[in-house]
Image (cartoon, grey):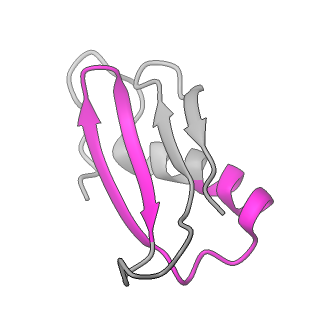
Amino acid sequence: MTATKPQGYSIRGAQALSIAQADAERVYGDLTPFQIEMKLEPDGWHVLYTLPDPATKGGGPSYIIDPATGDIVGKRYEQ
């Protein structure tokens, strides 16, 4: 997970993670079962919560965070 701030963007990785986590905690409550994957793509910060066992049914939320504004521009919830 990177916390660097790409040139031209005002939102760092840690900030994008905090934004996603606030929404995910509101919907899921406890996030400790999930692993977090995060990377910067051309359309924004992608934050994905996954369960460590791929055989487990369900999953966690995924987000796209605008790197300039910090707005959540995409999200999906898996149950």
Residue 12's quadrant in the figure?
top left
Residue 32 pos. (x, y %): 56, 82
| Placement of the N terminus among the 4 image quadrants | bottom left
In the image, the segment drawn in magenta is 21-50
Residue 31 pos. (x, y %): 61, 74
Residue 35 pos. (x, y %): 40, 73
- Residue 67 shown in magenta: no
Q: Is residue 45 above or below residue 33?
A: above
54 vs 57, left or right, is: left
- Residue 36 shown in magenta: yes
Residue 5's quadrant in the figure?
top left
Q: Who is closer to the viewer here, 55 or 68?
A: 55
Q: Is residue 34 above or below residue 79?
A: below
| Placement of the C terminus among the 4 image quadrants | bottom right
1 vs 11, left or right, is: left
Is residue 5 visible to the viewer in this orientation of the structure?
Answer: no
Is residue 32 visible to the viewer in this orientation of the structure?
Answer: yes
The residue at 42%/54% (across/down) is 48
51 vs 57, left or right, is: left
The residue at 47%/81% (across/down) is 56
Residue 34 pos. (x, y %): 49, 75
The residue at 22%/29% (across/down) is 6
Q: How many marks?
A: 0
Q: Is residue 32 above or below residue 5?
A: below
